[in-house]
Image (cartoon, helix red, strand yellow):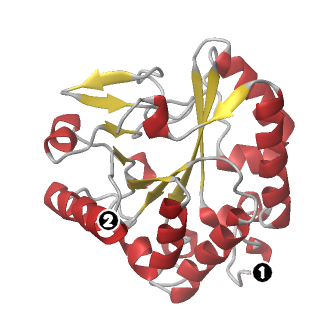
Amino acid sequence: MRYALLTFDLEEFTYPIESGQTRQDKRLFDLSKNGLDRLIKVLNFKATFFTTEEYANHFPSQISWLAARGHEIGLHGVTHTAKIDYRALQEARRHLEHRFGIKVFGFRPPRFCSVEPKRLASIGFSYSSSTHPRIGSRQWLLKRGIHSDYGLTEVPVSTTHLLRLPFSWVWFRNLGSTYAKICTLGVLANSPYMMLYFHPWDFSDLTLSGYKLPWYFKRHSGDWMVENLSQYVDWLRRNGIKPVRVMDFLRLG
């Protein structure tokens, strides 16, 4: 059996902050909320959602809905900042577990910043998805397959086998689902799993956001993304590729 680990990083839309257009703004969270609401309508597969504690506090009903329907909830940090405070992460993990009645196994840091596997394991995480070893990134020489360090399992985001080409959210939207399908088959020729990651704001129409955005942020956001992700999942199933939660692939819980 071949597996597709489809993951979503729940956070506010951060580009306007990073580009100096605004400070923290409720509209940035609303773009993500609206996108997730649209994604939920076609969510006929099990997925893993890494949420910041801040996002979960803003929209607890969405997290409750996902958890109640069997989706995995992982942690994506306290806020969407690259600064890692392990004590705060431990408290955020406990908070999610208590508030939503779930077990949090996994962690993905904001912007794939560096983490210490030993410390993540010591505060209760079973796995992390902290690396995306694609060509052109600072992580491109890191291991691509699943491996363990200090008792923590690392599940990297997938890249193609030879050239380490990426095919996550920006590539899916701008190069199309055909590119994603080709990459998917290429990854699965050498691995039992492939992992993609998206954001809730991918599913909002960013052309209507009111912010100045690069073309590759706006292109194919909203309706196109909702429809094409749904079609991509149907294609996975027709080709014997099963979408599963990361925790199920790793046989946790």
Q: Which of the 4 quarters of the picture holds residue 211?
A: bottom right
- Side (left or right) of 177 relative to 19: right
In this rendering, the answer to whether 195 lies above or below 44 is above
In this view of the protein, which residue sits in the foreground, 46 or 86? 46
Q: Position of residue 66 (x, y in %)?
A: 54, 62
User: Residue lying farthest bottom?
Assistant: 26
In this rendering, the answer to whether 48 lies above or below 155 is below
For label 1, the residue is 208
Q: Position of residue 198 (x, y in %)?
A: 61, 52
- Side (left or right) of 130 relative to 67: left
Q: How many residues crowd mark 1 within 10 Å: few (<14), some (14–19), many (20+)? A: few
For label 2, the residue is 96
Q: How many marks?
A: 2
Residue sitting at 61 percent across and 28 percent down?
Answer: 3
User: What is the three-letter code of the residue carrying label 2?
Assistant: Leu
Residue sitting at 60 percent across and 24 percent down?
Answer: 164
